[in-house]
């Protein structure tokens, strides 16, 4: 399993939490954070065994304390305090990890060495660049140890988690107050589960005049069997493929989906729909592969132009009737079973295409149980 595929860990740092220490610690325990860090052994003793109690001893002239109390893990400065493996031999039953402040080239070299050797390395980067983190992650490739990076807020955590497409194994939050642990949990533990696509049968294809259609240009390189779900009705969407396949008269646009008429629905995430005309730079849309795997991608641009339009009607095995209106042109494509690429203008009744049935009506994009007829 690659580092990117492993579950990410949430750690909380109490050392700078001020008057909120007790409250944010309770919040983190409730959210089942993997670890809580403190510089006070007595504070760690109040925490339940469901969380890893991590002691980060204060930088005192006398070095490490004689008693580590209830700590499950002790973080040390490997330059000042010694190698964690040697410390573990001198203190049977105590686990040790490294903590490194990366401030310059020399400390970056130390960080790279520790992530290749130690069970756990906690890193704090002081400059507003992600290059040192990239270097550390590259140095750790193939190693078994875990890397935890300190962050000052949830936004910084979301960036760390995407560096080099893998990020660290977890993030250590220095909270600014109550509620931030909850926000961190939502960011770190966010997942993009697969969805159940269904095979639809085309019932009709017809020209339907002209109108505005939207091309959705994403900030990601889309796969040949990947696109976005689009439909005229919220209860049923068809899978429009990305422009990753050769075209005779124009270059490929592997970031683009020629999606459909501007009033069409698409999935912004697993729960919420958006109209194509609502998408804009910085929005998120759900990219879907032919086997149902999903991932959120960032929209870089939505290009809306007037074009001839084509209506594709289809029916689901449940009897649900679906409709998709796209640009009336051969190079606009949808996906069929097995990732088969189908030119929209060559579709005919009886052809099979892939789609998705969200199953509930929508109000301002959110699922809701109410009476709603879409024709």
Image: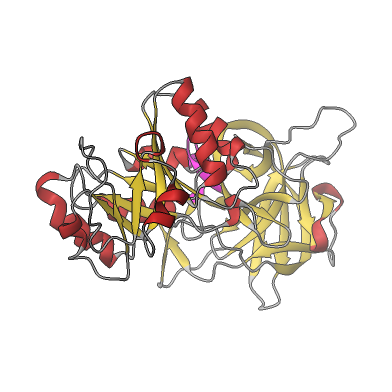
Residue 280 coordinates in the image, percent (x, y): 49, 35
277 magenta-colored: yes
Residue extending furthest left?
19
Residue 51, quarter of the rendered image: bottom left
Determine the residue positioned at 68% across, 41% down: 257
Q: Which residues are magenta?
A: 274-285
* Residue 211 in the image, given as x and y percentages of width and height: 63, 38
Q: Quadrant of the C terminus?
A: bottom right
**Residue 300, can we see it?**
yes
Q: Nearer the viewer, residue 244 or 212?
A: 244
Residue 130 visible to the viewer: no
Residue 139 location, quadrant: top right
> Does the magenta-highlighted stretch encompass residue 283?
yes
Residue 293 left/right relative to 373: right
Is 191 placed left or right of 183 in the picture? right
Question: Where residue 134 appears, x then y in whole percent?
Answer: 55, 32
Relative to residue 280, is residue 48 depicted above or below?
below
> Quick check: 100 left or right of 235?
left
Q: Nearer the viewer, residue 332 or 54?
A: 54
**Position in image of residue 6 (x %, y %):** 56, 57
Quarter holding the N terminus is: bottom right
Q: Name the residue at 50% across, 48% down.
A: 118
- Looking at the image, which residue is at 52% across and 26% down? 131
Front residue of 358/7: it is 7
């Amino acid at each position: 399993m690659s580092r990117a595929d492993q579950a990410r860990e949430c750690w909380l740092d109490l050392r700078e939490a001020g008057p909120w220490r007790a409250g944010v610690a309770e919040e983190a325990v409730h959210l089942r954070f993997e670890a809580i860090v403190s510089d006070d052994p007595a504070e760690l003793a109040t925490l339940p065994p469901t969380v890893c109690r991590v002691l980060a001893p204060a930088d005192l002239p006398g070095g490490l304390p004689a008693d580590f109390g209830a700590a499950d893990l002790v973080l040390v400065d490997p330059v000042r305090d010694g190698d964690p493996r040697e410390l573990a031999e001198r203190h049977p039953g105590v686990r040790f990890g490294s903590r490194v402040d990366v401030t310059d080239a020399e400390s970056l070299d130390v960080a790279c060495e520790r992530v290749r050797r130690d069970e756990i390395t906690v890193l704090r980067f002081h400059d507003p660049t992600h290059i040192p983190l990239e270097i550390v992650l590259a140095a750790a490739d193939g190693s078994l140890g875990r890397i935890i990076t300190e962050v000052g807020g949830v936004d910084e955590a979301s960036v760390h988690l995407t560096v080099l497409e893998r990020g660290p194994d977890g993030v250590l939050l220095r909270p600014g107050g109550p509620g931030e642990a909850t926000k961190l949990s939502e960011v770190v533990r966010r997942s993009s589960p697969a969805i159940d696509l269904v095979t639809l049968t085309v019932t009709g294809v017809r020209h339907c005049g002209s109108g505005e259609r939207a091309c959705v240009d994403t900030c990601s390189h889309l796969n040949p069997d990947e696109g976005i779900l689009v439909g005229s009705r919220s209860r049923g969407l068809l899978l429009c493929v990305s422009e990753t396949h050769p075209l005779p008269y124009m270059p490929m646009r592997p970031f683009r989906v020629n999606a459909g008429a501007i009033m069409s629905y698409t999935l912004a995430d697993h729960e919420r729909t958006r109209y194509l005309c609502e998408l804009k730079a910085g929005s998120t849309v759900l990219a879907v592969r032919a086997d149902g795997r999903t991932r959120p991608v960032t929209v870089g641009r939505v290009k809306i132009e007037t074009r001839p339009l084509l209506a594709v009607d289809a029916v689901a095995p449940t009897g649900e009737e679906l409709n998709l209106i796209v640009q009336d042109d051969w190079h606009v494509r949808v996906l069929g079973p097995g990732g088969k690429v189908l030119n929209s203008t060559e579709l005919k009744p009886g052809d099979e295409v892939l789609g998705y049935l969200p199953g509930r009506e929508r109000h301002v994009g959110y699922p809701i149980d109410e009476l709603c007829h879409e024709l």
